[in-house]
Image (cartoon, grey):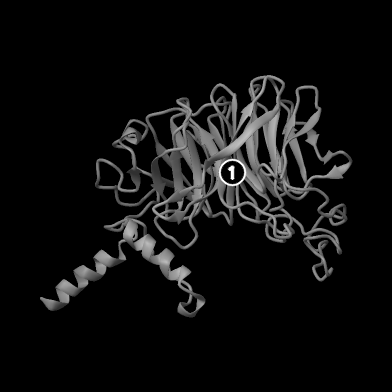
Amino acid sequence: MADLISRRAALGAIGAGSAGFALTAAQAQESGPALGPVEPPSTVSDPPRQFGPDAPPNVYFWDADVIAVDPSFNGLAQANAPIQRLWTGALWAEGPAWNGVGKYLIFSDIPNNRQMRWLEDDGHVSTFRYPSNNSNGNSFDWQGRQLSCEHLTRRVVRYELDGSVTVLADRFEGMRFNSPNDIVAAKDGSYWFTDPPYGGQLYEGAVGAPGGPTNPDGLINQRLGQPPEIGDAVREMETATYRIAPDGTITRVVGQDGAPDPNGLALSPDETTLYIASTGPGPGDGGVGGEGNIFAFDVTPEGEAVNGRLFTDCMVDGVKCGPDGLAVDVYGNVWSSSNAGRNVGYSGVTCWSPDGALLGRIRLPEVCGNLCFGGPKRNRLFMAGSQSLYAVYTATQGAGAA
């Protein structure tokens, strides 16, 4: 009997889904390196669950990993819809974007230099584009054309309906971009994109030429494994957010002082507010980097971003749920991917009201890099985990073209 009691107690302590465990892990990490790294448990749920397509069904009416922090979240989440892992096999999944006509989802596998496609009809996943120039964020504009941000070539491209490729942006004031990251299309025909430095690393793109901030001593051979035209660029500019006007004019709308290391971005349903995720410091930042916050800006009729303010610091139960990709639903709520590091049970998705109040969150067993709404009714939330693709049906719909 004693063994049974101690086993029950141990299982109760191991339940990573409890806020207490995640806080304990965070506190242990912060107490000093002498304790060593915290080993994460194997699941975020108590009792344990599996996520795969052939996994046993989730026995709860409300999925145990869809958590309402505010009662209003129950009106956004779908009560009898389980979180599903649709596919696994990426090294770092990013940039999901839904194609409404084709009924498929595009997403990037950045280190593997490919774009993947998930089909709605049978869940088939295959390579859509290889090489992808280490593409990160993808989207579709209001004309159905795919937009992609490429780390390797430091540019933003559009895939035209006839299959040709248009370079939308590769320089600003004569200087190369750092590594365009995410992009959103506005109804007026403009495109907004972020340019942090995360592609300036071996894993997700290419470090700069010797002497630049990402390869100061020249010890890294930036040409290995790369096309011959890659390797001469260095980081030249601050991190910033840009707008491409319908006539092709590129404007820096938010500088490093307004949202350092900008990552994911989204527009409100009426496109009068721009949200930017300011993630942690990237390679070559030189001590100036984001702190894991989301900022909001008013968008003027002329396409300017003004009145910048902190939307949320992404703290949940004392845990930093670092933002990456963003999506907005038709009610104006902001859905953000969450990277809580070793605080297992806090990685996944957070949902914030238009006023910046935490409404709810979705726990995933992996860090979530980006997310989007899709499906024929645009009520399915697709979540690109670090190695996998997840989805859950909701009671709301996504705003925007993709």
Label 1, on which residue?
277
Measuring 67% from the left and 32% from the top, which residue is drawn there? 146
Displayed quadrant of residue 305: top right
Residue type for callout 1: Ala
Q: Residues within 10 Å of mark 1 (few under 14, many from 20)?
A: many
In this view of the protein, can residue 123 be seen by the observer?
no
Measuring 73% from the left and 31% from the top, which residue is drawn there? 243
Q: Quadrant of the N terminus?
A: bottom left
Displayed quadrant of residue 225: bottom right
Q: Quadrant of the C terminus?
A: top right
Displayed quadrant of residue 304: top right
Give SS at disc 1. Answer: strand
| Above or below 37: residue 276 | above
Percent from the top left, x then y, of residue 86? 45, 46
Counting the numbered discs, the total is 1
Percent from the top left, x then y, of residue 256? 71, 45
Percent from the top left, x then y, of residue 259? 65, 43
Percent from the top left, x then y, of residue 271? 59, 24
Measuring 30% from the left and 51% from the top, which residue is drawn there? 56
Question: Which sits in the foreground, 323 or 2?
Answer: 323
Question: Which sits in the foreground, 31 or 339?
Answer: 31
Question: Which sits in the foreground, 63 or 51?
Answer: 63
